[in-house]
């Protein structure tokens, strides 16, 4: 079941062939992420919301474990694949087609999770508003858990020094889909704003039947680069309290050198 808000205003590429690619091939860290959130949610009661759920890579297995969980995403195409996954397991999951910075849902949640999507598609203002909307949907005593792949100053300086836009790579990543067709993905950086630390990338998705190219789609994505200390500060500005940052999928406190950080806040 997918409910729609009718408003997007987010610059992301998770549509069409890219959404299909995510559904068919984007399984890196999937088992580890599922197991981590199962562990985090094991003793939590009440409903769960998966913000930016995409193709349901977490939502569906968490629902299959018996959790009362719903999902949101800005992309109807990603949610189509999430519904497909849910239906194959005979699960009835509520999915909401909404941008995070315009999130308006009919109930609050005891736990809200967000994995792999912070800083994607908007700008620094929409990212902050998205956190505020998440906070407004958190039930009293509730907990918010999100990850972030932190950007360090060295990688940002490297972006700023490049000649942009980059040329398209001669070859991309090409994989065979379940129906025998093949999808190739090429990515390039086209601009980087030093003051906002926001980067715009283009993705080219190509569909092949045999050796013949039958479809080509080019879309854009905006990524705002944050250090994990930036995110910790934003969570406080958005109204969250008791913010704890841990290293990756561990229970150890995050260090300055950690690139993937999990945030726990109330």
Image (cartoon, grey):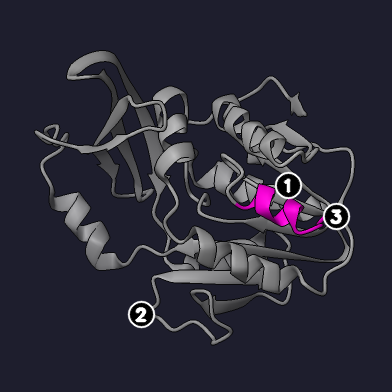
Nearest the viewer among 90 and 19 is 90
Q: Earlier in the sequence, mark 2 or mark 3?
A: 3
Q: CB under 8 Å between callouts 1 and 2?
A: no
* SS of the residue under disc 1: helix
* SS of the residue under disc 3: loop
Residue 143 badge? none
Image spot of residue 157 (x, y percent): 21, 59
Relative to residue 176, is residue 233 drawn left or right?
right
Relative to residue 7, is residue 29 drawn left or right?
left
Q: Main secondary structure of the magenta part?
A: helix
Residue marked by disc 1 = 133
Q: Earlier in the sequence, mark 1 or mark 2?
A: 1
Residue 257 badge? 2
Is residue 244 covered in magenta? no
Image spot of residue 217 (x, y percent): 32, 19
Relative to 47, is 3 above or below? above
Q: Residue at x 22, y 19 (%)?
A: 210
Viewer-side label of 1, 2? 2
Tell me where the magenta segment starts and ends, as one range.
58-67
Q: Residue at x 29, y 49 (%)?
A: 194
Nearest the viewer among 266 and 262 is 262
* SS of the residue under disc 2: loop
Relative to residue 163, is residue 76 drawn left or right?
right
Say which quadrant the N terminus sits in: top right
Image spot of residue 16 (x, y percent): 45, 22
Residue marked by disc 3 = 47
Q: Earlier in the sequence, mark 1 or mark 3?
A: 3
Viewer-side label of 1, 3? 3
Image spot of residue 257 (x, y percent): 36, 80
What is the C-alpha distance between the residues marked 2 and 3?
34 Å
Say which quadrant the C terminus sits in: bottom right
């Amino acid at each position: 079941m997918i409910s729609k808000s009718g408003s997007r205003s987010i610059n992301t590429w998770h549509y069409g062939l890219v959404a299909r690619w995510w559904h068919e091939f984007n399984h890196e860290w999937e088992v580890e992420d599922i197991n981590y959130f199962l562990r985090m949610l094991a003793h939590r009661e009440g409903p769960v919301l998966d913000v930016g759920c995409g193709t349901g890579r977490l939502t569906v297995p968490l629902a299959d474990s018996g959790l009362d969980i719903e999902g949101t995403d800005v992309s109807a195409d990603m949610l189509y694949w999430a519904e497909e996954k849910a239906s194959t397991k005979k699960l009835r999951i509520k999915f909401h087609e909404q941008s995070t910075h315009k999130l308006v849902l009919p109930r609050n949640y005891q736990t809200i999770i967000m994995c792999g999507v912070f800083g994607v598609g908007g700008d620094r203002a929409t990212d902050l508003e998205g956190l505020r909307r998440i906070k407004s949907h958190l039930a009293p005593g509730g907990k918010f858990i999100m990850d972030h792949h932190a950007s360090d100053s060295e990688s940002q300086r490297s972006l700023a020094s490049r000649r942009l836009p980059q040329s398209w790579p001669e070859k991309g990543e090409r994989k065979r889909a379940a129906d025998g067709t093949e999808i190739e993905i090429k990515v390039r950086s086209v601009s980087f704003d030093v003051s906002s630390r926001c980067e715009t990338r283009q993705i080219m998705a190509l569909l092949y039947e045999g050796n013949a190219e039958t479809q080509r789609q080019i879309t854009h994505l905006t990524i705002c680069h944050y250090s994990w200390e930036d995110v910790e500060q934003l969570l406080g500005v958005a109204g969250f309290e008791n913010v704890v940052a841990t290293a990756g999928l561990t229970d150890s406190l995050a260090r300055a050198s950690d690139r993937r950080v999990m945030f726990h806040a109330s």
